[in-house]
Image (tube, helix red, strand yellow):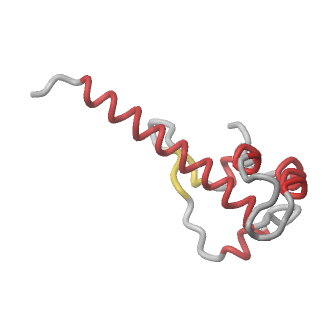
Amino acid sequence: MSPVDSKSNLADAGDEDTTGHDLKALTDEAESSNISLEDITDGTNGRGIPAAKFVDDIGAFAESFSPPASAELLIGAFSDLFTKFKQYEQSLSARSALLPML
């Protein structure tokens, strides 16, 4: 599967985010990150929809990446995953609307 594109969320952040990091530093981190969809999900179901991973210890999860992921990068990755879930939901809703009522 393709890597999670967390750069798209960072580009919308403006010149500086609320934590004081500048956009360039966040963009550089996103570009050098090795976070992929497989890293933040627990596989897929029969239809290919990713199963959300329950993260018990955020600190340990962030440290599991090389280099360790920042909170901003993880939020961006999970935000992208949430967007994909919403797209799946809309697709399934559209399909069910097309089915004839029994």
- Name the foreground residue: 23 vs 32: 23
Q: Residue furthest left?
A: 102
- Quarter in which the N terminus is drawn: top right
Picture layout, residue 79 above or below residue 66: above
The residue at the point 88 percent across, 62 percent down is 67
The residue at the point 17 percent across, 22 percent down is 100
The residue at the point 89 percent across, 53 percent down is 24
The residue at the point 67 percent across, 53 percent down is 77
Picture layout, residue 79 above or below residue 96: below
Picture layout, residue 18 above or below residue 39: below
Whole-percent x, y for residue 86 in the image: 47, 44
- Name the foreground residue: 18 vs 27: 18
Lateral position of residue 41 relative to residue 99, left or right: right
**Image label count:** 0
Lateral position of residue 27 relative to residue 47, left or right: right
Whole-percent x, y for residue 9 in the image: 70, 49
Q: Quadrant of residue 54?
A: bottom right
- Quarter in which the C terminus is drawn: top left
Q: Quadrant of residue 98?
A: top left
Lateral position of residue 84 relative to residue 97, left or right: right
